[in-house]
Image (cartoon, rainbow, N blue to C red):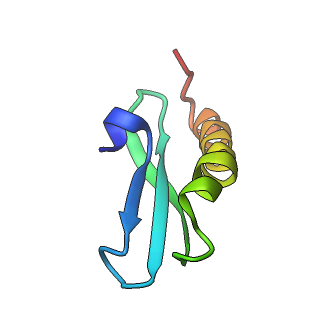
Amino acid sequence: KVGNCGYALDNEECEIGHRCISVPLYDYSGKIVAAISAFDDTDALTDTRIKEQVLPAMKKLSGQLSALLGWEEA
């Protein structure tokens, strides 16, 4: 799923009442080598909050960290 939309979402799949969103980190060759994640209660990590706040911030951080690993966005 990460390849299709750029992130992965665990919607109470691992633990009831919690959600987790992850974005990949890429190395110089474009290979996914790590990920960063945010985890919170479902009441706090709403779809709106993910879309408007969390995901944009995480994608920005992912790009910055990936650049340190030599990745260049196409």
Q: How many marks?
A: 0
Where is the N terminus found, in terms of image quarters? Answer: top left
**Where in the figure is residue 21, as x and y percent of width and height?**
48, 60
Instruction: Name which residue lies at 37% across and 85% down.
Output: 16
Q: Nearer the viewer, residue 66 or 70?
A: 66
Q: Image quarter for residue 63?
A: top right
Seen as rendered, the residue at the extreme top is 74
**Where in the figure is residue 38, as x and y percent of width and height?**
56, 66
Instruction: Name which residue lies at 33% across and 36% down.
Output: 3
Q: Is residue 24 left or right of residue 60?
A: left
Q: Image quarter for residue 43?
A: bottom right
Q: Is residue 43 left or right of residue 28?
A: right
Instruction: Name which residue lies at 39% across and 52% down.
Output: 8
**Where in the figure is residue 47, as x and y percent of width and height?**
54, 57
- Image: 44 above or below 35: below
Q: Is residue 11 left or right of residue 23?
A: left
- Image: 68 above or below 7: above
Instruction: Name which residue lies at 44% across and 46% down.
Output: 7
- Image: 41 above or below 65: below
- Image: 8 above or below 3: below
**Where in the figure is residue 69, as x and y percent of width and height?**
57, 38
